[in-house]
């Protein structure tokens, strides 16, 4: 821009400036009321207009008025006048005063384009009309009161016939200019409407307000069309562009946004074709829109003109994707028919039709140079085509046989194409040669999307876990992993500057700073039909709560909300069912489309068959194969909703079972015709028929990673074949005595599980043909179906009573049981590929989705399709399909189902940022709508409870956990981590075939079963939840090898060895770095890359991150930890969640010992049932029978074998009624450093914790299992050791110490003494070794934490020195150190025996009591020492002046010299009563000495000793109360020491201990029922009255049958009535009672009895009164709220807006107190001191 003419300067200040329509004059208004006009050609002042306005000029413009000619119309800001000036003469032609607004302070004006009318409004809150329309020609005025409060703006439409006004009442009004009749009222703003504007066509109105939104309205009917949101400050100005295609908005901070009206076209398009469109894309300039439809039609729209340019049908099925080239002259579409069609954009004619695969082509994209087209098919291959030329075949087909390619992207220079694979790897190819540029690893789950930055240096990859990985493509280095999205990512895209990365999923969009890898902003998309989550924009977390379509532009972070909802509850929109992206340009401009429209009900496909017997999903989440009752095999496409193929598979009966192979090419079926057939379903031809059965076959299965097929028939025979060859691998003819109902084979094909009609459930080893384990004992009813998880770790078995049992194959135990999963039989079960979810179905027509780790329910769908026969979940967990007896296939979309519920992280954020009362109300209402909302998970597996606990928010945590009822058992404290497939890469030389070969390397051996490594766990370790496979060497590894082939390339000339086997410590990165430097060389075509997949071992941290207890501990919030523990103690958690608690008990005990104690005290044993056991069986057993078992169901089978009940003789015999219960914590009896018992012993938990039911059972079981035997043996050995050391002491005291070693050896006593010394030294050395082993095992600090260990160390060190010194006769003479050492060691050795006595029942409690009493009197010992020391030294000082001739008294001196030791001994003798005071008579200070000695004896003998007696009595009572707990703690310490000193073989023996601890305890029933306090008092009173009546009958002489009288008791009736120690009426003295007193007592007793009978009615009446009072208080609160609003309205004439920072603190109570309510009502009604 440049300055053409300088007009001049206005000294008084310019207030307005406008240029005439003819561009010949410029009109300027000044602050003093003057006007100036300049000639634009000459730049000189044309005229100056003075004295027209008193004050600033607000508006001035040149118009052509019919009566006045060319004139200037000006409006004053303060003088309320409109002046018409002659342009040339400067004379005023008309002066119009706005007297209607003369009392208003602030006026605003708007003038029609012809200048004929002026609208004037005041921006003050006034009671009189606040808008006036002035006719300039006639000077007529009309006025109206248009808005409550302030009028913010008023504008004319372009033709001037209507006025649009906005105000503080949140409304826009449309008025007729001539009559000011209200035509339309527009409501929708959530605050004052600050500005508005009208487009040129007068069809649209745009407005902005305090809600920070720009809203677009229809001027005709007032409907709100769109809402634009990007600014988080109020909008002060809005304006249309001259073309009407753009909107400008400016907020109060000065930020300006330009909005495109293309959004209105897109929303109209989606609303109009919601049930038909399937793909949408935009051209680079946003002027063309290409639309694909479900019926194969393709439409091209002109966005600006909003009309269709052409429409043709180019596909026979759904159009899956569409794309423009960079020049927008060509476009391409991909369809379900497997073709990519190249079209001319101007005419819509076909330029080429490229052939693809038999599967649908799911994506299409032009290269940036427009020379190639890439498309990804549903079969997981990437097809490359040349745009120029007539060839229809692909130039190259890029694939990975290890995984499927899900998405692809071109590099900016068109030289590379990258594909994201289902195993998490990222393949990058050279587009021209097809060579592999690099293989990027690091993702733990499937990669769903990818994007290059603008220069092609960075590659962003999104995964199904919601994480994003950033790679440096030059070095193939993983830079960072960004975690934070709530669901699987749909799109990742960089901005133009590569400074920000936006990751978009179906629930939210997150904006990241690339440099710091930190999250900048999050946009949460929430389906909000009730308006619960509406909130103002937030700079960091923006809740986009809407009930229609939302468009999100990542570049500007702007939102467009379609305000017209689709009111069709039955809408089945493919396009709006999930989040979509509309690309405009190459890669860096994509529009996210999110919609809440449509129905979430399951899709139903009604077949013409009688019933569906079996269903199974393909590995690409697209196909479902069904077996029907009439023998057909049906392949159904759930994505496109159509039947793909139908095969008449079994003609002589129903098709019982069907399974799809891993590559989706083959279908295995079995039927009543005794055939097992492998079909090529596309050709409808059988590939192989497996022979071996002769009767109806009820079930079959195919291994996912292996090459085996299994089937079971009605005679109970199971056959296993090789899939490809059909050779028999194993036959189990007598697997079941009745029909085989279900079989399941592990992924590697080494293990099978079977369920029979004989109620038998077995797991078999295929290679050996033996039964590994029988699960029949774990069944509570008839088993019906079984299914292995893909990782082989778990086996789910369904039952006829509605239960589902999950067995941990690796741990060999029952993992959890889901009770009453369905109402009726559970007929089917299926696992997702990542092993995070499994689904079940039943005869109640319900499909349920469960978390695989904790067993908590996630979703339940009532299909209402009749009894269900089978179900299948897609590998990614996206779809759940179920077949019914009515022939209906119901498909539920989990993504759509979860879309209706708020996402967990967002919901937590919303609850945490609002008041507790409001949050509680919303949470309870949502929980009533969605019963399993507590367990709904995000992509990471976190529920809202985990989010609240991880952030340490105790308020939200308590709100969530307290909302669940006790004993509900549905809360999940742990969620499953994904079963990961790690892909390692081998790059090696290929002599021939180049990339076509794919071989190389030795063939992978068959992986071993999970049972092979089951016993190889290290000692003391146990399977931590899902970590069972992580501790095995090769337990669950599955190997699949394949080559990444490039089809259509040239032949290889030679090869180059790139590197060795690429494992963990290999140089894969260095190799790829070197090869990336020559990535476009033709030599890359000569390299073969071998991909080997194997099960990735789970990291312990992965499960800790999904453990609610671990998250609560990590948050360092004790309230959160307490909330979790309380929910577990109240049985609110699922059965699988107790594994999570067991895992974190060590950390809990170390950090919160008191809390750990209270939790264990509240955690009662689970009652499993009652049994009747013969007394002969229980004879000889203790009070309770205890054992461990791998199951916790079917109590009778559990105890029958253990107690050998089958050996009990029949016939009449006495039985005992016993109660069966179990410890709720699994693996509570585990052994090792992290075991529960050792952790509690080493922590500071209170001693009472050992008396809890859980710890009592653990200690008892371990004591009986191995500790009792070991400690008994060690005790006997130590007793012999003590005896030998005692003999040594005796011999040492009797020997002649003058003899030398040889001389003493010559005697018989010497020989015996030396031999005993040798034994003592050897035994003590062994004790020293055990102590060192224990010190090494538990650590030095923990070792010396126990005073017994310090005692042992001292004793062992001393005893080890004594034998060598005695043998060599060192310090053995008189006065030597050996004698004191032996004496001191003798005491230590004998007292050490008390340690072993702690563990045994008769002696242990006594020893503990002695220790506790000794510890309790330490204060007494300190006080006694103080007395002895003070008085002893005082008497010692006085005795120095003794008058004895022989010296000082011997009590205080030795050999006449002062001696402190003798003095203290004398004082001790005085304490014991042995003293002689004769010395005092010869002392110079004999009186003072006697006083001191008397005072000492008084303090000691009278005060301290009597206090000691009272103290010991109190301590004894207290110790006796905790005697058993202290004893159990001592026993636990001994058990831990035994475990620590166990050898490795012993540890391995007990390491595989079953996880569940079971008990049998006798049922003890009381003789009297429990009574309340009042009932007990009444009973005592009745007993007393009976005794009194007996006394009266005997003449007030005592009870019946006794004569004589007793001594008189205390005076008064009460004192005479009750005497004795207890005061319970048992001792009666009736000497002073009369008949009147007795009648009075009887009357009072009757009244008490009547009151007791009336208590329930009184309590019920009090409840009614309380409810009535609560309702009245709630009504009064509502009245107070209304009165406050009325008060605000009368005072301010507008609502009072209280900002969040100024909002008063929330009240702690839920309602006002009665006094507060009364005072507030009086104040508002004017009856109090404060009146309105």
Image (tube, grey):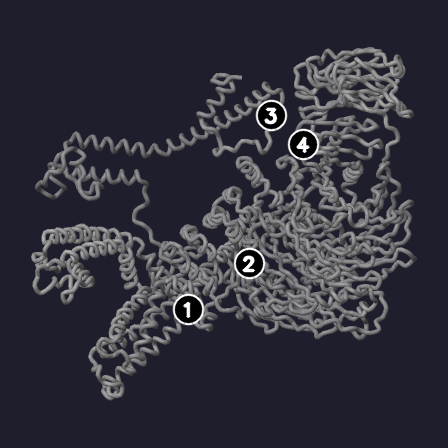
* 3D distance between C-alphas at marks 3 and 1: 73 Å
- Crowding at dot 1, Cα within 10 Å, few <14 / some 14-19 / many 20+, comes out as many
Q: Which residue is mark 1?
A: 1334
Q: Quadrant of residue 1090?
A: bottom right
Q: Are marks 1 and 2 in contact (CB under 8 Å)?
A: no
185 vs 283, nearest the viewer: 283
Mark in the foreground, 1 or 2: 1
Residue 1307 at x, y = what percent? 23, 87
Among the two numbered marks 2 and 4 on one chain, the one whose residue lies closer to the N terminus: 4
Q: Which residue is mark 3?
A: 1696
Residue 950 at x, y = what percent? 55, 49
Among the two numbered marks 4 and 3 on one chain, the one whose residue lies closer to the N terminus: 4
Residue 533's disc is none
460 relative to 215, above or below: below
Mark in the foreground, 2 or 3: 3
Of helix, strand and loop, which one carries label 4?
A: loop
Q: Which residue is mark 4?
A: 211
Residue 806's disc is 2
């Amino acid at each position: 821009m440049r300055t053409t003419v300088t007009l001049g300067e206005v000294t008084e200040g310019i207030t307005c400036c406008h240029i005439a329509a003819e561009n010949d004059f410029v009109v300027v208004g000044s602050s003093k009321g003057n006007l100036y006009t300049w000639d634009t050609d000459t730049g000189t002042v044309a005229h100056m207009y003075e004295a027209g306005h008193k004050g600033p000029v607000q508006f001035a413009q040149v118009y052509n008025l019919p009566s006045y000619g060319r004139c200037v119309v000006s409006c004053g800001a303060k003088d309320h006048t409109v002046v018409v000036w002659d342009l040339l003469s400067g004379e005023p032609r008309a002066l119009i005063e706005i007297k209607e607004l003369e009392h208003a302070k602030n006026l605003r004006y708007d003038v029609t384009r012809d200048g004929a009318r002026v609208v004037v409004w005041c921006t003050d809150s006034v009671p009189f009309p606040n808008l006036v329309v002035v006719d300039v020609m006639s000077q007529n005025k009309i006025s109206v009161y248009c808005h409550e409060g302030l009028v913010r703006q008023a504008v004319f439409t372009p033709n001037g016939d209507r006025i649009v006004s906005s105000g503080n009442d949140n409304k826009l009004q449309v008025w007729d200019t001539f009559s000011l009749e209200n035509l339309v009222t527009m409501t929708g703003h959530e605050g004052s409407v600050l500005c508005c504007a009208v487009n040129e066509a007068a069809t649209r109105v745009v407005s902005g307000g305090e809600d920070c939104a720009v809203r677009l309205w229809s001027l005709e009917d007032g409907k709100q069309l769109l809402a634009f949101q990007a600014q988080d400050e109020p909008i002060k100005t809005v304006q249309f562009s001259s073309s009407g295609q753009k909107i400008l908005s400016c907020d109060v901070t000065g930020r300006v946004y330009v909005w495109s009206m293309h959004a209105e076209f897109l929303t109209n398009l989606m609303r109009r074709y919601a049930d038909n469109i399937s793909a949408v894309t935009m051209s680079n300039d946003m002027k063309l829109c290409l639309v694909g439809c479900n019926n194969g039609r393709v439409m091209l729209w002109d966005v600006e003109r909003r009309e269709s340019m052409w429409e043709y049908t180019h596909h026979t099925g759904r159009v899956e994707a569409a794309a423009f080239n960079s020049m927008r002259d060509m476009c391409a579409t991909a369809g379900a028919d497997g073709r990519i069609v190249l079209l001319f954009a101007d005419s819509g004619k076909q330029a080429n039709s490229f052939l693809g695969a038999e599967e649908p082509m799911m994506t299409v994209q032009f290269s940036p140079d427009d020379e190639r087209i890439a498309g990804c098919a549903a079969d997981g291959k990437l097809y490359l085509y040349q745009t120029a030329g007539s060839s229809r075949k692909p130039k190259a087909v890029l694939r990975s046989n290890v995984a499927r390619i899900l998405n692809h992207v071109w590099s900016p220079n068109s030289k590379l194409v990258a594909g994201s694979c289902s195993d998490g790897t990222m393949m990058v190819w050279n587009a021209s040669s097809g060579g592999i540029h690099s293989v990027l690893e690091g993702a733990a789950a499937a990669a769903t999307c990818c994007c290059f930055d603008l220069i092609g240096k960075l590659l962003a990859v999104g995964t199904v876990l919601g994480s994003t990985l950033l790679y440096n493509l030059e070095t193939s280095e993983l830079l960072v992993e960004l975690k934070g999205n709530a669901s699987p990512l749909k799109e990742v895209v960089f901005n133009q500057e590569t400074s920000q990365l936006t990751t978009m999923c179906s629930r939210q969009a997150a904006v990241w700073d690339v440099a710091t890898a930190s999250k900048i902003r999050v946009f949460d998309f929430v389906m909000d039909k009730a308006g619960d989550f509406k909130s103002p924009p937030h700079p960091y977390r923006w809740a986009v709560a809407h009930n229609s379509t939302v468009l999100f532009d990542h570049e500007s972070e702007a939102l467009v909300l379609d305000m017209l909802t689709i009111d069709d509850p039955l809408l089945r929109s493919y396009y709006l069912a999930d989040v979509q992206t509309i690309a405009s340009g190459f890669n860096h401009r994509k529009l996210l489309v999110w919609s809440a429209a449509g129905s979430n009900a399951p899709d139903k496909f009604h077949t013409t068959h009688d019933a569906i017997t079996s269903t199974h999903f393909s590995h690409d989440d697209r196909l479902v194969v069904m077996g029907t009752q009439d023998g057909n095999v049906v392949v159904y496409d759930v994505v496109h909703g159509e039947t793909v193929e139908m095969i008449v598979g079994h003609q002589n009966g129903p098709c019982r079972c069907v399974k799809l192979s891993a590559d989706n090419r083959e279908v295995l079926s079995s039927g009543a015709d005794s055939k097992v057939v492998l079909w090529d379903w596309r050709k409808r031809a059988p590939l192989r028929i497996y022979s071996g059965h002769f009767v109806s076959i009820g079930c079959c299965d195919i291994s996912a990673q292996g090459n085996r097929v299994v089937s079971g028939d009605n005679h109970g025979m199971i056959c296993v074949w090789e899939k490809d060859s059909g050779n028999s691998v194993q036959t189990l003819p007598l697997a079941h005595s009745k029909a085989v109902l279900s079989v399941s084979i592990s992924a590697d094909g080494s293990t099978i599980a079977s369920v029979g009609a004989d109620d038998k459930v077995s797991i078999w080893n295929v290679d050996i043909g033996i039964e590994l384990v029988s699960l029949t004992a774990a069944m509570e009813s008839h088993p019906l179906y079984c299914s292995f998880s893909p990782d082989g770790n778990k086996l789910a078995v369904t039952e006829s009573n509605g239960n589902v049992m999950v067995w941990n194959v690796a741990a060999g135990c029952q993992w959890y049981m889901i009770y009453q999963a369905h109402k009726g039989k559970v007929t089917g079960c299926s696992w997702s590929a990542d092993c995070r979810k499994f689904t079940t179905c039943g005869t109640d027509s319900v499909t349920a989705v469960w978390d695989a780790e904790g067993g908590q329910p996630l979703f339940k769908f009532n299909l209402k399709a009749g009894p269900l026969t089978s179900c299948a979940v897609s590998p990614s967990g996206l779809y759940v399909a179920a077949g019914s007896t009515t022939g209906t296939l119901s498909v539920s979309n989990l993504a759509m189902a979860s879309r209706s519920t708020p996402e967990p992280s967002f919901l937590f954020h919303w609850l945490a940022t609002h008041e507790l009362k409001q949050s509680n109300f919303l949470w309870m209402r949502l929980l009533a709508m969605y019963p399993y909302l507590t367990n709904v998970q995000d992509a990471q597996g976190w529920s809202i409870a985990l989010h609240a606990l991880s952030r340490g928010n105790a308020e939200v945590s308590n709100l969530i956990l307290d909302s669940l009822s006790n004993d509900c058992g549905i809360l999940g404290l742990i969620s499953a981590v994904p079963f990961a497939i790690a892909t390692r890469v081998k790059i090696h030389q290929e002599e021939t075939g180049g990339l076509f070969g794919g071989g190389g390397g030795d063939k992978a051996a068959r992986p071993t079963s999970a049972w092979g490594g089951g016993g190889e766990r290290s000692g003391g370790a146990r399977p931590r939840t899902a970590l069972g496979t992580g501790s095995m060497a090769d337990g669950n590894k599955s190997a699949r090898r394949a080559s990444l082939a490039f089809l259509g390339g040239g032949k290889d000339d030679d090869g180059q060895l790139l590197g060795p086997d690429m494992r963990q410590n290999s140089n894969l990165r260095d190799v790829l770095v070197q090869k990336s430097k020559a990535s476009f060389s033709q030599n890359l075509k000569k390299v073969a890359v071998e991909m080997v997949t194997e099960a990735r071992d789970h990291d312990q941290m992965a499960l800790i991150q999904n453990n609610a207890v671990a998250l609560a501990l990590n948050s360092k919030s004790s309230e959160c930890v307490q909330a979790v523990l309380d929910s577990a103690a109240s049985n609110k958690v699922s059965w699988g969640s107790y594994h999570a608690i067991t895992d974190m008990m060590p950390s809990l005990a170390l950090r919160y010992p008191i809390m750990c104690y209270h939790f264990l005290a509240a955690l009662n044993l689970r009652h499993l049932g009652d049994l009747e056991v013969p007394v002969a069986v229980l004879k000889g057993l203790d009070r309770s029978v205890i054992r461990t078992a791998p199951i916790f169901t079917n109590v009778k089978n559990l105890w029958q074998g253990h107690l050998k009940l089958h050996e009990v003789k029949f016939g009449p015999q006495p039985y005992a009624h016993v109660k069966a219960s179990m410890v709720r914590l699994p693996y509570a009896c585990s052994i090792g450093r992290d075991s529960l018992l050792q952790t509690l012993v080493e922590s500071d938990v209170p001693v009472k914790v050992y008396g809890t039911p859980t710890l009592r059972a653990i200690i008892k079981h371990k004591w009986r299992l191995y500790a009792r035997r070991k400690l008994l043996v060690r005790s006997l050995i130590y007793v012999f050791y003590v005896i030998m050391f005692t003999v040594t002491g005796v011999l040492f005291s009797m020997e002649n110490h003058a003899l030398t070693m040889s001389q003493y050896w010559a005697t018989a006593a010497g020989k015996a003494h030396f031999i005993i010394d040798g034994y003592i030294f050897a035994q003590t050395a062994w004790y020293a070794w055990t102590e060192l082993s224990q010190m090494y095992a538990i650590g030095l600090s923990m070792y010396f934490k126990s005073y017994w260990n310090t005692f042992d160390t001292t004793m062992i060190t001393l005893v080890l020195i004594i034998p060598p010194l005695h043998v060599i006769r060192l310090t053995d003479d008189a006065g030597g150190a050996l004698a004191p050492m032996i004496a001191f060691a003798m005491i230590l050795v004998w007292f050490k025996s008390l340690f072993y006595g702690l563990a045994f029942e008769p002696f242990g409690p006594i020893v503990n009591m002695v220790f506790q009493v000794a510890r309790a009197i330490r204060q007494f010992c300190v006080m006694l020492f103080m007395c002895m020391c003070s008085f002893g030294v005082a008497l010692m000082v006085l005795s120095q002046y003794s008058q004895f001739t022989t010296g000082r008294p011997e009590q205080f001196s030795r050999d006449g010299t002062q001696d402190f030791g003798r003095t203290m001994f004398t004082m001790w003798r005085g304490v014991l009563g042995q003293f002689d005071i004769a010395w005092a008579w010869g002392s110079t200070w004999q009186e003072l000495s006697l006083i001191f000695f008397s005072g000492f004896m008084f303090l000691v003998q009278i005060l301290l000793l009597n206090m000691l007696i009272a103290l010991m009595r109190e301590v004894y009572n207290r110790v006796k109360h905790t005697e058993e707990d202290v004893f159990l703690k001592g026993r636990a310490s001994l058990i831990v020491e035994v475990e620590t000193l166990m050898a490795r073989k012993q540890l391995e023996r007990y390491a595989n201990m079953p996880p569940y601890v079971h008990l049998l305890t006798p049922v003890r029933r009381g003789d009297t029922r429990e009574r309340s306090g009042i009932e007990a008092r009444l009973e005592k009173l009745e007993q007393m009255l009976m005794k009194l009546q007996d006394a009266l009958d005997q003449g007030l002489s005592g009870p019946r049958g006794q004569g004589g009288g007793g001594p008189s008791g205390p005076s008064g009736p009460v004192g005479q009535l009750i005497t004795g120690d207890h005061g319970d009426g048992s001792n009666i003295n009736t000497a002073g009672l009369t008949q009147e007193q007795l009648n009075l007592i009887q009357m009072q007793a009757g009244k008490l009895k009547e009151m007791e009978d009336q208590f329930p009615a009184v309590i019920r009446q009090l409840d009614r009164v309380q409810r009535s009072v609560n309702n009245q208080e709630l009504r009064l609160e509502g009245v107070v709220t209304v009165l406050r609003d009325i008060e605000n309205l009368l005072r301010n004439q507008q609502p009072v807006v209280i900002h969040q920072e100024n909002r008063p603190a929330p009240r702690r109570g839920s309602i006002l107190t009665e006094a507060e309510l009364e005072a507030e009502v009086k104040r508002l009604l004017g009856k109090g001191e404060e009146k309105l």
